[in-house]
Image (tube, rainbow, N blue to C red):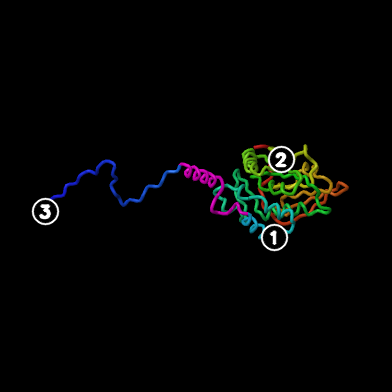
Amino acid sequence: MTEKRKFPLPLGRVQPTNAAPKPVLRPQRPLQDAARDRARAQSPSGLGLDSEHVRARMVERLRRDGLADARVIAALQAVPRHAFVDSALVQQAYEDTSLPIGLGQTISKPSVVARMLELMLAVQPPLARARVLEIGTGCGYQAAVIAQFARSVVSIERLKPLHDKARANLAPLALSNLRLVYGDGRIGHAPNAPYDGIVSAAGGADLPSAWLDQLAPGGRLVAPMADARGAGQVLVVVDRLADGTLRRSIHEAVRFVPLESGLA
């Protein structure tokens, strides 16, 4: 048998191959991918949390349970609750549950937020162009909801890290009618008083006198307070009547963090 010798191909000729052609490198495509990856990192993807339909389902559940005030319904529909929840808990953002936000504090259940705001607004005659004081900003969610229907909102927080967190959470919403204050909520915020509505996210043995002093005639205060029977907390509603007198009513049991004084 005659051995066949292999000779190198002449210059200029390409040796045939069955390998697939290599893709053409396009630097623009990786740049686009990087931008998309950055967007995914900033906003949870694949969960649909930025969809209005997700919030609509939450609001519909609240309506079935009795929520009727159109202003509160529209406000809850407008505010993206997932933007105020820590990333590890973001899949629970539209469940009716409270979630930890750090420093022993929580973001309230949507049903509790809805109930307190509906109580605050359920006055006759209705609050007109309301000025609202919120005690306990927390992560900023309830302040954002109130800002959807109030003329102006002052929200005060005694814990500096939470005050800073709320400021960061609220920045993308650019709410020009909302002012955040780092201060002692027990003394309210006299510079912007009186307020048509006051709502507190913390409860003590009684209502601070400063809150009552800063409530405008025709205004309403809603806050948790220790039940006189020693059975936890209840929602308390205080109305300042046109003649300046106060009228108090007791509502359902709730569970809020304790009301504390001072700055931290």
Amino acid identity at mark 1: Arg
> In the rendered structure, which amino acid carries the disc numbered 3?
Met
Q: Secondary structure at mark 3?
A: loop
Locate residue 129, reporting x and y percent. 79, 47
Is disc 2 surrounded by few (<14), some (14 to 19) or many (20+) residues within 10 Å?
A: some
Q: CA distance from mark 2 to mark 3?
A: 96 Å
Residue nearer the viewer, 49 or 87? 49
Tell me the number on the disc at residue 1. 3
Report the number of discs.
3
**Which comes before the other along the chain, label 3 or label 1?**
3
Q: Which residues are magenta?
A: 27-51
Identify the image quadrant of the C terminus: top right
Task: Give the main secondary structure, helix, strand or loop, of the magenta stretch.
Answer: helix
Label number found at residue 179: 2
Asked if the magenta segment contains residue 233, the reply would be: no
Queried whether the magenta region covers residue 48, the answer comes back as yes
Q: Secondary structure at mark 1?
A: helix
Per the model, the C-alpha gap separating discs 3 and 1 is 93 Å
Using the image, tell me which numbered label, if any, was put on residue 86: none
Q: Where on the picture, by quarter, is residue 110?
A: bottom right
Residue at the spot of label 1: 63
Q: Which amino acid, mark 2?
A: Arg
Q: Secondary structure at mark 2?
A: strand
Q: Position of residue 160 (x, y in %)?
A: 64, 38
Nearer to us of marks 3 and 1 is: 3
Residue, x 62% and y 48% (percent of image)? Answer: 106
Residue nearer the viewer, 205 or 112: 112
Q: Position of residue 25 (x, y in %)?
A: 42, 43
